[in-house]
Each structure stands twice: as structure tokens, then as C-alpha cells.
Amino acid sequence: MPDIDYLLSTGFLGGKWNQFGGVGVPDGMGRPLRVHVPNTVSHVMGRGNGGDLVFRSVEDRLVFLGLLDRVARRCGVRVLAYCLMGNHFHLLVEVGRVPLGDMMRRLLSRYAKFFN
């Protein structure tokens, strides 16, 4: 895994660590771009809008896990751990050839179509 201090010193991440433990955000931007580094492990969390439920039933959880499996395989992502709560979820993944944001967009858009 790359050394974060080295990446910051080279300007690769485009900023300095802020008080919240993340890379600084340039003025006018919502958040910094996520850097894609294959074979790194990432913690991902997703929440329901306004604290709404993401999973209403066991079936919802099974559908989500099935979609996660399918999308992760296609994107070359290894799912190391997951925790599905009622109004949010946590994933621990090893990123592959496809950027994490692209993988999550594929997963969540498919799940939203099912859920809504």
C-alpha cells in the first residue's frame, strides 16, 4: 500500500490533511477527488437519505448482497467484510482495476432500482 505521507508530499493527492482526517478540499468543491490506487483496502459506508432505512427486510439484504457479489466480480473488487444495518451499511473492500467510485455507482444504482 502506498505511503500517504509520500503521496501528500509529492502533491499526488492535491492537498494537505485537514482537521477531519482527510485531504483538503479546494475552494468551490464539495470534496476532493478520490484517488484510484489498485490493490488498496478501503472502508466504504452508505446511509439512507435523512436516516431512512436502506434495508427493510431480509430480502432487501439478500438482494443487496447478490448485487454486491455480481458488481464486485465484474469490477475486480474483493469484498473482505460487510455489515448491513437498517439505515446504513459498511463495506471493507480491496479495490481492483475499476475505481471504487465507479463500482459503488454501479452497485447503488442497481440497488436503488430494486428498492424504489
Image: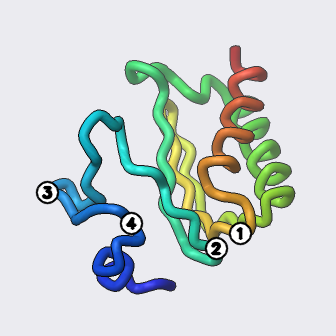
User: Which kind of residue does numbered mark 3 sit on?
Assistant: Gln
Residue in the picture at 63% in, 70% down: 94
Q: Residues within 10 Å of mark 1 (few under 14, many from 20)?
A: many
Instruction: Say which amino acid is labelled 2.
Output: Pro
Q: Earlier in the sequence, mark 1 or mark 3?
A: 3
Which mark sits nearer the N-terminus, 4 or 2? 4
State the residue position of label 2.
38
Q: Nearer the viewer, residue 42 or 58?
A: 42
Question: Which residue shows up at 35% across the image and 36% down it?
Answer: 30
Give above or below for 9 relative to 89: below
Q: Position of residue 76 (x, y in %)?
A: 79, 65
- Between the residue at mark 4 and the residue at mark 3, the CA separation in whole angstroms equals 16 Å
- Horizontal side of 8 relative to 62 (left or right) equals left
Determine which residue is flagged by label 4.
13
- The tag earlier along the polypeptide, 1 or 2, is 2
Query: Is disc 1 in contact with disc 2, using a CB cutoff of under 8 Å?
Result: yes
Q: Quadrant of residue 110?
A: top right
Looking at marks 1 and 4 on the same chain, the residue that comes earlier in the sequence is marked by 4
Calculate the distance from the C-alpha at mark 1 to the C-alpha at mark 2: 5 Å
Question: For residue 96, which numbered disc appears in the image?
Answer: 1
Label 2 residue SS: loop
Q: CA distance from mark 4 to mark 2?
A: 15 Å
Q: Nearer the viewer, mark 4 or mark 2?
A: 4
